[in-house]
Image (cartoon, coloured by chain):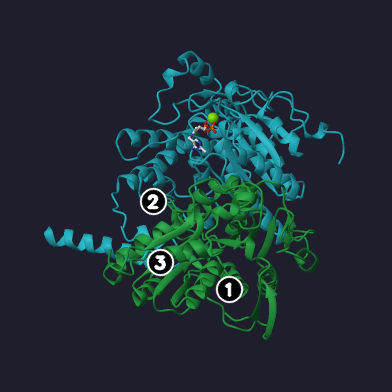
Amino acid sequence: MTGDAHHLLPSAEPVTLIDCHGRPVASTAYAAPDAAALVRAFAALVTARRLNDQAYALVRQGRLAVYPSSHGQEACQVAAAQVLAEGDWLFPTYRDTIAAVNRGVDPVEALSLLKGDWHCGYDPYEHHVAPHTTPLATQLPHAVGVAHAARLRGEPTVVMALCGDGGTSEGDFHEALNFAAVLRAPVVFLVQNNEYAISVPLARQTAAPSLAYKGIGYGVPGERVDGNDAAALLAVLGAAVERARAGGGPQLIEAHTYRMQAHTNADDASRYRRDSEVAAWVERDPLTRLEAHLRKRDLLDDARLAELTAEAERVATHLRDGLNRDVTPDPAMLFDHVYARPTPQLAEQAALVADELEREGALR
Amino acid sequence: MTVTAPGHQKLTMAQTLNRALRDAMTADPAVVVFGEDVGALGGVFRITDGLTAEFGEDRCFDTPLAESGIVGVAVGMAMNGLRPVVEMQFDAFAYPAFEQIVSHVAKMRNRTRGRVALPMVIRVPYAGGIGGVEHHCDSSEAYYAHTPGLHVVAPANPADAYGLLRAAIASDDPVVFLEPKKLYWSKEEVELGAPVPGIGTAVVRREGTDATLIAYGPAVPVALEAAEVAAAEGRSLQVVDLRSIVPFDDETVCAAVRRTGRAVVVAEASGFASVSSEIVARVTERCFHALAAPIRRVTGFDIPYPPPKLEHFQLPGVDRVLDAVDDLQWEDR
Ligand SMILES: Cc1ncc(C[n+]2csc(CCOP(=O)(O)OP(=O)(O)O)c2C)c(N)n1
Ligand SMILES: [Mg+2]
């Protein structure tokens, strides 16, 4: 064991590569991503914002029970997905639908949970995206297990494990970091610090100078990044992924961002924060920032933006159509997947429901 | 499933469990074993003795002391092609893993409509009777049995321990494997070539005609001893060993009760809202007309597990079982 923990310390300030006005910020630690990566990220951001807003609207129309939006956090969502290679895994929370979609999950299937058709609507193995996890931080040990299993087989898999600022107070967050460190599991832990856990501000969650410090006690290097700067996120997350892939072990990254909307549509944010606080974050919006940057570099013009907007609209229409389609989940499914084969008791209970349905049908 | 090396041997349950792990690891490279002190030490009960030496650090390893982490990491490994077998050091020390077990281990298959199976085994040395201090003697089966999605088994002899553990590791569903600590050192002639029981099958351990004792895990030897004593007193008791709590073998249990018309459930766990109450309910629902008397239970009291010097009060003993049998309304009152 070495006494020097210096290499574990995050940067003093969050890494920023593009400022709020779209101007490049010099960094000695990280090279700016290439133009193609930034253009790709911007296209994804436009669609991400459109999907967030579409999902929000679908709640008001009663098509979704609730939607924990990542509005304002889209740069984190997009970058977390973009830095991964094929075969890498993503472990999302309930707020990370957009990241899952950016890994290839159909947005309609991704929202099955919130539509109420079934818990996880997609096949986790198809795009290597674990089911959305709601019990806070409990997905993080799973991420370590997936990574460790891959490492044991000599596969180059890296796992991106997401959680929120509130989730860092849970025991599983700490157990996962410690296991990942001891096993040298290739996991990148990305904490989206959006300043709130429902109504509770970060100051009530932790007294640490930064959430990125929470890995130090476990020997996990920390890093801080501006969570609304897609360029910085791509650089920092990309470096962490490559480091993990090369056998360098896990890393903990705190992305400082902000939850622009209430926790979910069911929440009333006016009870715990002022509009002025929210307004101050508008100018740090991840979309406008990258847009300004790309325009300055002639990597984006009105015509291209119109194309991207049209593409986003197409995806939103797909989501809307999918969620407006009423499917009645088959009640037989209640019993189908509790075990590989139903127990005799479940077979009895399934027969009971089948019988109820038959009698109901006969009455009609 | 049959075992490779045939022949009869006198072995303890600790030895047959160790043998089952070794044979499963040999048969399937996907089987990995981990937990607290399971490596060089071989586990505090020596169930994993020699596995790291034989199979290497990647196949059997010590983890940090964090039960939720152990089970949570096992979930991820099971998601990604392995068959983890994890050891909880003692019954009460599995509680930090409760959320992982209930919210993920039990539900993953269901949440993903069968796409993600979790073939994993959580081994729990459990129950009392060993003079253990507090937090080392809990009978925690009801928590697991109440949770849909888990299989829960508890062997009561060395041969079943081997067979059930092999079946548990081969299962595509998660299994909570309860190992009665006080039976770890019980020796028995074991036929290693014999076919092993599947999960979900109870067995009649002793034939009898007057009443049926239903037991599982650490209570089975108590029931057998009670039947022996009763036989000397002229009463013929049948003994059913559940082996599996989930799935529950209604067929074998109910057939056994119907044959005698009287039954006593014997279990070490506290009786309130327990596996024993479930057994009474199930049997009564199914066999009411075959019953000559209400089913009685002999269970632990509804108290936290007592200290060693008082634990004999808590454990169901032969006398209590026989008293309960006497109470089965042999004559009209
Ligand atoms: C174990 C657990 N406790 C409580 C909750 C209820 N809950 C859901 S979201 C949330 C806040 C989480 O905040 P944070 O981790 O910062 O994520 P964010 O919602 O801001 O993305 C709480 C308390 C839960 N889902 N899981
Ligand atoms: Mg938060």
- The structure residue drawn at horizontal position 44% and vertical position 26%, both measured from the top left corner, is A262
Residue B5 makes an appearance in the image: no
Chain coloured cyan in the rendered structure: A
Q: Which residue is mark 2?
A: A118
Q: Which residue is mark 1?
A: B160
Q: Which residue is mark 3?
A: B326
- The structure residue drawn at horizontal position 17% and vertical position 58%, both measured from the top left corner, is A360
In the figure, B61 relative to A171: above or below?
Answer: below
Q: CA distance from mark 2 to mark 3?
A: 52 Å
Q: Local crowd at mark 2 within 10 Å, few (<14), some, or many (≥20)? A: some
Give, as a three-letter code, the residue at label 2: Trp
Task: Measuring from the top left, give residue B132's x and y in whole percent.
Answer: 66, 52
Q: Local crowd at mark 3 within 10 Å, few (<14), some, or many (≥20)? A: few
Q: Chain of mark 2?
A: A
Q: Chain of mark 3?
A: B
In the figure, B317 relative to A254: above or below?
Answer: below
- For residue A109, the mark is none
Q: Is residue B282 left or right of residue B289?
A: right
Q: Quadrant of ligand 2?
A: top right
Chain coloured green in the rendered structure: B
Asked if the beta carbon under badge 3 is closer than 8 A to the nearest atom of ligand 1, the reply is no
Give, as a three-letter code, the residue at label 3: Asp
Q: CA distance from mark 3 to mark 1?
A: 31 Å
- Say which element carries label 2: loop
Q: Nearer the viewer, mark 1 or mark 2?
A: 1
